[in-house]
Image (cartoon, rainbow, N blue to C red):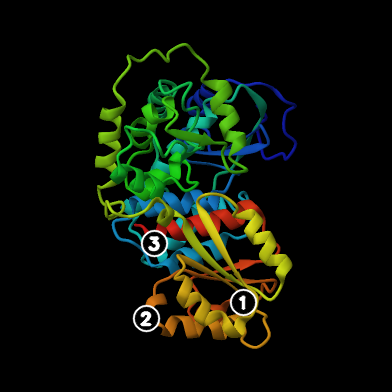
Amino acid sequence: MNQGSSSVADTERTLNPIKLLEQLATSQAKGCLRITANDIVWLLYFYEGKLFYANHSLEPIERLEQHLRRISPVILANQVYTDLREQLKEANLEATYPSLDYQAIRWLIAQGHISEQTAGTLVKSITKEVLQPYLLITSGTSELLARDTAFPIWWSGNFLFVTKECQTELQAWQALQPAILSPYQRPYLMNVEHPLLTPDVKVKLSKILIGFSFRQLSLLLKQDELTVANNLHRLINNRIVGLRSPQPPFERLHQLYTAGMESDRFNEKDQSITATLAAVDSSTGAGATSLSTGELIEQATYKIACVDDSPTILREINRFLDGDSFKVFPIVDSGTALMKIIRINPDIILLDVGMPTIDGYKLCSMLRKHPAFKKTPIVMVTGNTGIIDRAKAKMAGSTDYMTKPFTQAGLIEMVSRHLMAEHQ
């Protein structure tokens, strides 16, 4: 492991993740251990040999927001998350020391959104999630970026205790193999006609299994992700529930879980499907969704109204969101969009900003005045990135702002994030 602040890392070699942490603890290190493996960068921050934060380069903004939603004692306004994402958007994870997402937590405290105690819980929670796949690394590059700068530390811990907690959780995931390989897989209802699947449970599962990973489902259901995975485990074994591959870029972490936890420990005694279904029925009713047993399966599909004068963009959005979980309603003419949206009654609305007849800002304002859409997520879609454009979108009543061009992963993340917020 290199010492100092050189940007030149070691050539790739065999790594022992715990041994690296032990070396830093023993040497009372101050700085950042930078690990690169599987095209992912891990940043582990130490002060006087104690670990005080860890993060990696895959979707740090999404991770921070998910943990904040999970541990915050109050449900923060959507605007707080929008402002937070703006601070971090397109920024290098290592742009500041500590990393920019750590500085964002400092901003949340300064703005009075969270307390220092909550920040400590948040930091530990993120660190534990990041350490789990870190412990599965077998090869890569490493370097120590030595720093001795004053900054607030809201939590720090002995790496032995923290890694022990992470190893225990990894063993729990390992016990679910081969049915479930990682928390990044996305369960979906595969066999809706199974005789042991009751109508009530069928509807509830159809409402929540819409493309979220186990990690995202835990936030939606306000449960630990291992609890969610265990509740679905037998359904997956019996092909009632299927698993889709992780959404990019999380397939890279999934590969670490798959390769790093191979074992023959999967030897659980068989249990009845009925008992598992009862557990799912109980868990999905616990503050997650309030569903009537008479609802139809078809109603579980989330409706997305998309208004854009470009048929090409509409086709692309429809292609990106193609699947059983979402139904896209494309609208080309903004002049007739309001009445069409009222008839559709969508779960989320995407509006292009620059349209003839009625632009996106005006249409957004009109929708917000209608009683049915006062709280419906409305996302403005535009090629403009200026602060004035964002301010206009906010004044018009938009929930969020998405810049063209966007990727499939970015669009799905945006839509899923607001659907999850609506179900909290």
The residue at the point 61 percent across, 51 percent down is 409
Does dot 1 land on a helix, a strand or a loop? helix
The answer for how far apart the CA atoms under marks 3 and 2 are is 16 Å
Mark identifier at residue 387 = 1
Q: Amino acid at mark 3?
A: Glu
Residue indicated by mark 3: 422
Q: Which residue is mark 2?
A: 371
Residue 2 appears in the rendering: yes
Task: Please tell me which residue lies in front, 75 or 4.
Answer: 75
Find the distance from the CA under tag 1 to the CA under tag 2.
29 Å
The Cα atoms of the two marked residues, 1 and 3, are separated by 26 Å
- Which of 388 and 313 lies nearest the eye of the viewer? 313
How far across and how far down the image is residue 238, in percent?
41, 26
Q: Left or right of 333: which side holds 370?
A: left
Compared with 297, 193 (above or below) is: above
| Residue at image location 34% in from the left, 39% down from the top | 224
Looking at the rendered image, the quarter that the N terminus falls into is top right
Quadrant of the image containing the C terminus: bottom left
Q: Of label 1 and label 3, which has the lower sequence position?
A: 1
Q: How many marks?
A: 3
- Crowding near the residue tagged with mark 3, few <14, some 14–19, many ≥20 C-alpha atoms within 10 Å: some
Looking at this view, name the residue that lies furthest to the bottom.
357
Is 59 drawn above or below residue 351 in the view shown? above
Question: Which amino acid lies under the numbered mark 1 shown in the image of this protein?
Answer: Ile
